[in-house]
Image (tube, grey):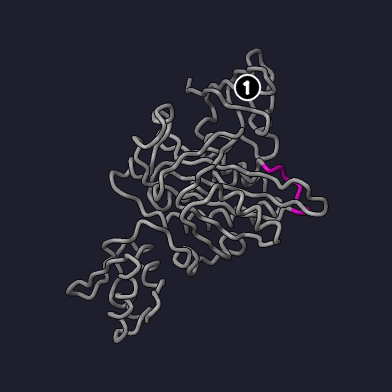
């Protein structure tokens, strides 16, 4: 039986769902085309060929395939190996097991998490097939940045990928959320691994609301949460977005390893949804208010407090309560 030709799927998706005859001929022998399309049809992909020989991807399955996400990804670390699961307790837990085996960069996706979590132990809810839910373990041994910098890098990766793939104005809400038009579509959680003595591994987990029906969310989240499909007005391509996020996360991981906190900070300033706004936050049990004057991947959020002085707040001990434009 013919195996699926993932080059046809990824090339079609990355060219907007349509592939010219010449491009198609470079990927598959025309004598094998029908058997190749039949193999993909068994996986849920439906193609048609126009009178001019253009290959059109008309439909794709709800589920994610590891082979498709990984095919021709071209990353150095993140996504060097890809796994997909139907249902798990937490992808971060599976990535932690990968870290203990020293398997850096394996991207673990799940269609459903039964115990997904966010910052400060909050639950992350996502119906099956609605979102991107994935984690990866990275070896930060010998690197001096704080784990929160990796969370910012993850948020930057998601914001950039959403803009690239879906042309939506995604913005970062410090320290780990991604918003579109003020609605949260993504969160990033970075966890260390307890008990390590000779190395430092970090697990980064990312959730993105892609084809999420707001009615499926708990009532208290519907006002604040959004979904990419809701902004587009149609179902979004999860696999295409998954590939883009992995590529951007791999890029930012290389930047961090090279000591590029300044470069990450500059990008996060440009993508920030709160820079220049008036914000209220809670740090170590105390409430502070002021104008957000800087986003720094090393020192945190910098407020110009009432009365004049500026103060930096580290993300690990700070909750952003509210922000608004002047």
The vertical placement of 57 against 148, above or below, is below
Q: Residue furthest right?
A: 197
Q: Residue furthest bottom?
A: 31
Q: Residue furthest top?
A: 307
In percent of width and height, residue 193 lies at 71, 47
- Majority secondary structure of magenta residues: loop
Indicate the quadrant where residue 55 lies.
Answer: bottom left
Q: Is residue 277 left or right of residue 29?
A: right
Q: Is residue 170 left or right of residue 13?
A: right
Q: Is residue 274 visible?
A: yes
Give the residue displayed 68% in from the left and 29% down from the top.
317
Q: Residues within 10 Å of mark 1 (few under 14, many from 20)?
A: some
What residue range appears in magenta? 141-147
In percent of width and height, residue 112 lies at 46, 49
Q: Is residue 182 visible?
A: no
Give the residue displayed 23% in from the left and 70% down from the top.
48
In percent of width and height, residue 251 lies at 58, 56
Residue located beneath label 1 in the image: 282
The vertical placement of 95 against 21, above or below, is above
Under circle 1, the secondary element is: strand
Q: Residue furthest left?
A: 51
In percent of width and height, residue 115 lies at 54, 42
Q: Is residue 142 magenta?
A: yes
In which quadrant of the rendered image does the N terminus lie?
bottom left
The vertical placement of 47 against 316, above or below, is below
């Amino acid at each position: 039986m013919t195996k699926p030709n993932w080059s046809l799927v990824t090339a079609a998706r990355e060219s907007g769902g349509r592939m010219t005859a010449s491009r198609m001929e470079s990927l598959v022998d025309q004598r094998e085309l029908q058997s190749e399309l039949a193999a993909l049809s068994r996986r849920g992909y439906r193609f048609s060929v126009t009178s001019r020989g253009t290959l059109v991807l008309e439909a794709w399955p709800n589920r994610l395939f590891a082979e498709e996400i990984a095919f021709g990804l071209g990353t150095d670390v993140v996504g060097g190996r890809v796994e997909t699961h139907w249902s798990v307790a937490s992808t971060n837990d599976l990535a932690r097991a990968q870290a203990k085996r020293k398997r850096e960069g394996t991207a673990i996706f799940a269609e459903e998490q039964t115990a997904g979590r966010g910052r400060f132990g909050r639950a992350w809810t996502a119906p099956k097939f609605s979102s991107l839910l994935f984690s990866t373990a990275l070896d930060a041994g010998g690197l001096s940045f704080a784990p929160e910098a990796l969370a910012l890098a993850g948020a930057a990766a998601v914001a950039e990928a959403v803009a690239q793939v879906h042309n939506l104005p995604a913005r970062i809400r410090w320290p780990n959320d991604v918003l579109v038009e003020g609605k949260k579509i993504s969160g990033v959680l970075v966890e260390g691994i307890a008990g390590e003595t000779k190395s430092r591994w970090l697990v980064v987990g990312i959730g993105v609301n892609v084809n999420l029906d707001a009615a499926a969310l708990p009532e208290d989240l519907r006002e604040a949460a959004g979904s990419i499909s809701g902004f587009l007005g149609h179902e979004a391509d999860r696999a295409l977005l998954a590939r883009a996020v992995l590529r951007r996360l791999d890029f930012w991981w290389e930047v961090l390893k090279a000591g590029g906190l300044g470069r990450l900070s500059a990008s996060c300033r440009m993508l920030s949804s709160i820079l220049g706004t008036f914000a209220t936050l809670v740090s170590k049990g105390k409430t502070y208010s002021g104008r957000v004057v800087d986003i720094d991947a090393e020192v945190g959020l910098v407020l110009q407090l009432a009365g004049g002085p500026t103060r930096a707040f580290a993300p690990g001990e700070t909750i952003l309560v509210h922000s608004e434009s002047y």
